[in-house]
Image (cartoon, rainbow, N blue to C red):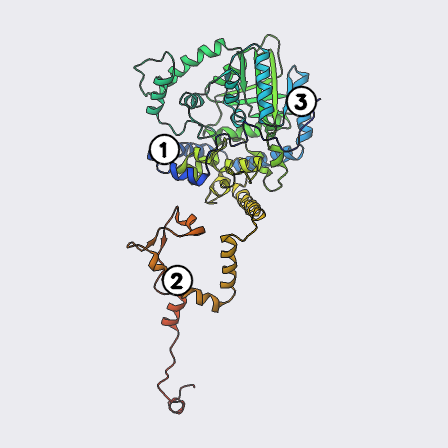
């Protein structure tokens, strides 16, 4: 029996959770906010999915109870993960499958490439898998002389367009129909040159292109939505039928799955089959649900390999506050309600997992100290919409605040001298320690008007404050503070024109 790795992953050349990271979120977001077409595409798509989801969720009077059940089941999995993983391995092996354990991306990629070479294959078909994107499998296989063909329509669009996914569920959400047609005409062999941007025509062109691959390729690679520990059963849910083709036609099937995707029993799947379709695509039931258990002679692939991937998941599990991020079932509901994601898109996050869930998963799995991670916990308004939408009740805002704290602590540990924030907080402590001190500070506020433009807005501040004005303007301060206004309007001014004797004679208090 293989030994379970419960340690930190090696840093591999492929896949750290942020395979495509090249710049921090603030810089990437600033760039993408200038793309009006991107914002229009995202706004239309996320708005449509939100409306569909709300309708089907409203049909279930026990929706909140289902969410609670999903959350509790995932908590149980995390508490008993080592035992459940061993149980899964035993049941997969008993039913003719082979289980491989991968500590990190490099090990997982080497395992998969070795299995493909053992079959004498030079090309594979793939059904959408976030885990293989996370480890950079396609790029690794290309270097090994193996061609990997994505079969999910949105993944195919991204692949043909030499692009990166922008959404967990709808990777090509940032593309409109005209852009997709142009990609097909430029990159898809044998496509009709008169192809229009009609959705049916686009789908039929993709179908004809993929059908040849399905019928000729001997090895397929898949992910898994769920794995049932007590039976060794794997599950994939999808909407196009490409998954069914990948999971049944090839001679060899290789599944790459994160170790957190477990469920204890087959009965538990019932809860998640009610939660996932409604939360992801706004459907009561997904069109295709494929379940397979090991190998069955004469039916489906005759070689089945399951690669169980750690790649930082045990590091996330060790974080008591953040481990609930591993409950995620990749529905993307949090992204579809997030005001930040809707305006910046997924590429700005620089992570395989964009949006609110990516803002916590990547730092938890690969460390908040990583340069590409330390800005992600701040990519949120903390409005809480993601928590309300999450089908397994992951408190994303709470984890974001936790990770911000870890980032501050990490920065403090690296510095030998006080930062601007340290100096600013020390000054604020003095200012707010007494009313007299605060009054003195307020007297200097009107000087801020000198920094404002003709529109009475401060558009740029120096130093640390520049981070605020980079994305918003500050109204010019008023001519006088509230304290000064109140004193002027409501506190009577003593009359000093009368002598004490005169005041006494008039009946006034001295």
Residues packed near mark 1 inside 10 Å, few (<14), some (14 to 19) or many (20 plus) = some
What is the CA distance from the residue labelled 3 to the residue labelled 2? 67 Å
Pair 3/2: label in front: 2
Query: Who comes first in sequence, dot 1 or dot 2?
Result: 1
Q: Is residue 192 above or below residue 157?
A: above
> Residue 89: which numbered mark, if any?
3
Mark 3 and mark 2 in contact? Answer it, CB < 8 Å.
no
Q: In the visual, does 507 lie left or right of 134?
A: left
- Quadrant showing the C terminus: bottom left
Residues packed near mark 3 inside 10 Å, few (<14), some (14 to 19) or many (20 plus) = many
Pair 1/2: label in front: 2
Which residue is more in the foreground, 58 or 458? 458
Q: In the visual, does 367 lie left or right of 150?
A: right
Mark 1 — residue?
38
- Place residue 343 in its image quadrant: top left
Q: Secondary structure at mark 1?
A: helix
Mark 2 — residue?
445
């Amino acid at each position: 029996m293989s030994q379970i790795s419960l340690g930190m992953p090696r840093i591999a050349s492929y896949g750290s959770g942020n395979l495509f990271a090249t710049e921090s979120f603030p810089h990437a977001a600033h760039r993408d906010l200038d793309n009006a077409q991107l914002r229009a595409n995202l706004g239309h798509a996320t708005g449509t999915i939100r409306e569909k989801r709300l309708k089907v969720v409203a049909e279930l009077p026990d929706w909140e109870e289902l969410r609670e059940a999903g959350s509790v089941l995932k908590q149980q999995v995390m508490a008993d993960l080592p035992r459940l993983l061993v149980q899964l391995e035993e049941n997969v092996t008993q039913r003719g499958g082979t289980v491989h354990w991968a500590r990190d991306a490099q090990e997982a990629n080497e395992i998969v490439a070795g299995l493909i070479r053992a079959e004498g294959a030079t090309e594979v078909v793939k059904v959408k898998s976030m885990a293989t994107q996370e480890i950079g499998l396609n790029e690794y296989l290309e270097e090994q002389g193996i061609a990997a063909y994505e079969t999910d329509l949105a993944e195919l669009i991204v692949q043909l367009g030499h692009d990166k996914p922008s959404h967990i569920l709808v990777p090509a959400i940032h593309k409109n129909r005209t852009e997709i047609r142009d990609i097909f005409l430029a990159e898809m062999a044998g496509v009709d040159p008169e192809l229009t941007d009609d959705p049916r025509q686009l789908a039929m062109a993709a179908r004809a292109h993929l059908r040849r691959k399905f019928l000729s390729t001997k090895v397929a690679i898949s992910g898994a939505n769920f794995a049932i520990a007590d039976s060794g059963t794997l599950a994939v849910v999808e909407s196009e039928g490409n998954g069914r083709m990948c999971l049944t036609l090839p001679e060899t099937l290789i599944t790459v799955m994160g170790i957190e995707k477990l469920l204890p029993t087959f009965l538990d799947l019932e809860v998640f089959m009610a939660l996932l379709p409604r939360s992801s695509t706004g459907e009561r039931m997904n069109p295709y649900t494929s379940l397979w258990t090991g190998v069955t002679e004469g039916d489906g692939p005759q070689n089945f390999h399951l690669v169980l991937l750690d790649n930082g998941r045990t590091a996330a599990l060790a974080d008591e506050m953040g481990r609930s991020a591993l409950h995620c079932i990749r529905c993307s509901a949090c992204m579809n309600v997030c005001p930040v994601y809707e305006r910046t898109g997924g590429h700005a996050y620089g992570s395989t997992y964009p949006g609110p869930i990516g803002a916590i998963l990547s730092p938890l799995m690969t460390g908040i100290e990583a340069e590409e991670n330390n800005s992600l916990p701040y990519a949120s308004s903390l409005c809480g919409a993601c928590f309300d939408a999450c089908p397994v009740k992951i408190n994303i805002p709470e984890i974001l605040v936790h990770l911000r704290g870890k980032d501050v602590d990490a920065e403090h540990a690296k510095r030998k001298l006080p930062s601007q924030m340290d100096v600013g907080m020390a000054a604020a402590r003095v200012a707010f320690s007494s009313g007299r001190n605060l009054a003195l500070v307020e007297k200097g506020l009107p000087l801020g008007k000198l920094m404002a433009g003709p529109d009475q807005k401060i558009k740029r501040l120096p130093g640390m404050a520049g981070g605020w004005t980079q994305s918003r303007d500050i109204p010019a301060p008023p001519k006088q503070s509230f304290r000064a206004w109140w004193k002027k309007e409501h506190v009577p001014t003593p009359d000093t024109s009368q002598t004490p004797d005169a005041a006494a004679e008039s009946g006034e208090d001295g």
